[in-house]
Image: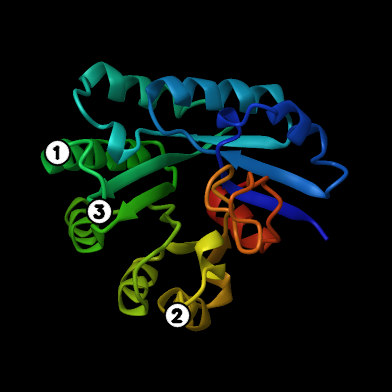
Amino acid sequence: MKLVDTHCHLNLIENKEDIIKNFKKNNMEYVIEVGINVENSFETVELANSYENIYCSVGIHPNDSSNLTNKDFDTINILSKNEKVIAIGEIGLDYYREHTTKKEQFRSFEVQLNIAKENSLPVILHIREAYDDALNLIINEGLPEKGGVVHCFSSDWKTAKKFLDLGFYIGIDGPITFKNNHKLVEVVKNTPIEYILPETDSPFLTPVPFRGKKNNPLSKILLENSKKLFNI
């Protein structure tokens, strides 16, 4: 069985070289290394350019959206033109932690949505406790032609359907295995399988029964879904 991980952060793992060496043995066809800020986006591109079976996204996470300059956004735009970059992300809104103001997050999200549209790339969305505002911004700004995925979806079926109606995929991670997560189970049951993208978010969000251990990117996944969205 072929495996693929559509969302991981290998650059945050100390023994990433060992993990990458095991890709072939573990039938890992490819992984997508996801950027979270300008510096890290440089690193994702460097890593992807070093390995045939690693692709990447570039972008600025909402928690890193303080004090951004036009130069920062220009850098993301330039990096997005690399042939191994297949998405803009992870971008979005996060109200769970107050690392940045809503105004700063909105500006960052809006600018990067437009970068995705200009470069005909899908987006990888990070949304936490901000689904209504994120939906409104996307509807007002217009989503990229290529659509995108709502990474680590954590809301209910009603909200999931709104994103599905816009053409987004739903990213499902380790929390689906957490006890009493009935809300997310309902989302998975109702979402057409053609629009589900299992993710690891490695090294985070380790599924039960492995919580507390590092989450290596070895999720079973619907390979064709990821290839279709990210044009791989």
Q: CA distance from mark 3 to mark 1?
A: 23 Å
Instruction: Look at the picture and state if 4 lies above or below 195.
Output: above
Q: Which marked residue is nearer to the observer: mark 3 or mark 1? A: 1
CB of mark 3 within 8 Å of CB of mark 1? no
Seen as rendered, the residue at the extreme left is 103
Q: CA distance from mark 2 to mark 1?
A: 31 Å
Is 217 placed left or right of 41 in the picture?
Answer: right
* Neighbourhood count class around disc 2 (C-alpha, 10 Å): few under 14, some 14–19, many 20 upward: few
Res 142 label = 3
Q: Earlier in the sequence, mark 3 or mark 2?
A: 3
Q: Residue at x 71, y 43 (%)?
A: 30
Seen as rendered, the residue at the extreme top is 71
The x, y position of residue 121, in whole percent, is 44, 43
Q: Earlier in the sequence, mark 3 or mark 1?
A: 1
The x, y position of residue 14, in whole percent, is 64, 26
Q: Residue at x 69, y 51 (%)?
A: 4
Q: Kindly state the secondary structure of the residue where label 2 is placed.
A: helix
Seen as rendered, the residue at the extreme front is 212
Instruction: Look at the picture and state if 212 lies above or below 131.
Output: above
Q: Which marked residue is nearer to the observer: mark 2 or mark 1? A: 2
Q: Earlier in the sequence, mark 2 or mark 1?
A: 1
Closer to the camera in the image, 194 or 157: 157
What's under tag 3, amino acid-wise? Gly
What's under tag 2, amino acid-wise? His
Closer to the camera in the image, 221 or 166: 221
Closer to the camera in the image, 162 or 20: 20
Q: Kindly state the secondary structure of the residue where label 3 is placed.
A: loop
Closer to the camera in the image, 226 or 206: 206
The residue that mark 1 highlights is: 101
Res 182 label = 2
